[in-house]
Amino acid sequence: MSNSAKQSSFLLALLPLVILYAGAAVLVVLSRDGLGGMVQYWEFFVPVVAVISLMSGWGQAYVNGNSRLMYLIKQVIIWGLLIAILWMFQTLGITSALGDQKYALVLLALLVLTAIAVGLSLDFKLFFFGLFLAAGAYLLAVPADTTILTKVGEIFRIADPQNKPQTIVVTMALVGFVLSAFFLISVRGAIMAKRIRAK
């Protein structure tokens, strides 16, 4: 395989991570002005995360020697349960009883837990995404508490971080993306090594 083909393949492998982090960062930033008004966008984002999660962990399943069929079944069950819970919230009237603001926080909490669970059990890249989402959800749930803004601002030397939440969100997204990309690179290396040994 030529170098340009390898680079194209790597960039294509990075695309799902770009979609995840960019989409989540944009939603977190826009939700700071009114989380309740962004509920439908978060609901649309859940299946996007599910599909990306489903597609992006094949390499790790191969490296670990896990059955791809079992990987697929586990992913479908986990994400299917989340989508079924959200659907039940809608059909049973729980969404309207909670109100948009509280429902959005519940949705985010469920998405965070699902992403972290998938990350720990099937595709570690999603663990970093789940952590980023957790930080974003905290910023949305407790906008007056600037602790996380201050800590991230100190680490990355961002002056006056309390007044720059968008900068902090983008910075956290970039850190999560870099960690996920690093893990992706290590998985791709392990795949190549395993294929070479198999020959």
Image (cartoon, rainbow, N blue to C red):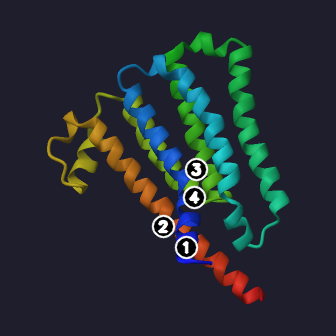
Mark 3 surroundings within 10 Å by alpha-carbon count, few (fewer than 14), some (14 through 19), many (20 or more): many
- C-alpha separation, residue under disc 1 versus residue under disc 3: 19 Å
Mark 4 surroundings within 10 Å by alpha-carbon count, few (fewer than 14), some (14 through 19), many (20 or more): few
Q: Mark 4 points at which residue?
A: 12
Q: Which amino acid does label 3 sit on?
A: Ile
Quadrant of res 82: top right
In primary-sequence order, the first of circles 4 and 2 is 4
Query: Left or right of 115: which side holds 58?
Result: right
**Which label sits in the foreground, 1 or 3?**
1
**Which label sits in the foreground, 1 or 4?**
4
- C-alpha separation, residue under disc 4 versus residue under disc 2: 15 Å
Compared with residue 90, is residue 28 higher up or lower down, i.e. above or below? Answer: below
**Which label sits in the foreground, 3 or 4?**
4
Mark 3 lies on a secondary structure that is helix
Residues at badges 4 and 2 in contact (C-beta under 8 Å)?
Answer: no
In primary-sequence order, the first of circles 1 and 3 is 3
Residue 182 is labelled as: 2
Q: Name the residue under label 3.
A: 116
Mark 2 surroundings within 10 Å by alpha-carbon count, few (fewer than 14), some (14 through 19), many (20 or more): few
